[in-house]
Image (cartoon, rainbow, N blue to C red):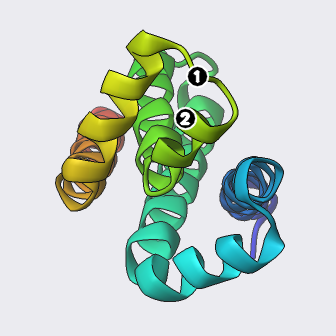
Amino acid sequence: MTNTAAKPVLYGVLASAILLGVYFAVLTLVSGWGFTLEQFGNYWYFITSLAAGFGIQIGLYQYLKALVHGGQGMGKVVGVSGTTSTASMISCCAHYLVNLVPILGVTGLATFVAQYQIKIFWVGLAFNIFGILFISNKITKFKKHI
């Protein structure tokens, strides 16, 4: 693997690991380790897909950045998609925050998240796919002009 390819792969794997770490840390702090493992067991396919998609975007972004020595706005797409991925993963259990923060507004948000949990996962995956396609398209266009 060349140095040009190794760094983006490393960044992508690291980004996926960090996203999973955030997921496990937040849920463990909110609801305990047992609950976190239960939720991961129930939704592992969404959670790992979101983390992998985010890692792929980071890797592609780093690769493109290495090619052109500047992202030209791609960071915004990665940032929005990454935020959506993290929010989708955490949303599977965010309704349990009601137990910790009994604020009226949070109760409404928690009810919304609990009701639309699977749909929120799908939105996160859609953002991941969009981000991957967008950055891949930029790489393809850039390579055509080299």
**Circle 2 — which element?**
helix
Q: CA distance from mark 2 to mark 1?
A: 5 Å
State the quadrant of the N terminus: bottom right
- What is the quadrant of residue 14 in the picture? bottom right
Nearest the viewer among 66 and 120 is 120
Can you tell which mark lies on residue 102? 1
Residue 59 located left or right of residue 124: right
- Residue 26's disc number: none
Where residue 129 sits: x, y (%)?
25, 53
Residue occupying the point 21% across, 57% down: 122
Residue 143 visible? The answer is no
- Label 2 with label 1: CB-CB less than 8 Å: yes
Image position of 99 (left or right of 11):
left
Residue under the image location 62 percent in, 40 percent down: 99
Q: Position of residue 119 (x, y in %)?
A: 17, 54
In which quadrant is the C terminus drawn?
top left
Q: Quadrant of residue 49?
A: bottom left
Which residue is found at the position 46% from the left and 44% from the top?
A: 95
Q: Identify which residue, 13 or 28, lies in the foreground.
A: 28
Rendering coords of residue 26 (x, y %) = 74, 47
Q: Using the rendered image of the protein, determine whether residue 41 is visible from the camera's viewpoint.
A: yes
Three-letter amino acid code at disc 2? Val
The image shows residue 84 at horizontal and vertical percentages of 40, 36
Q: Which residue is mark 2?
A: 98
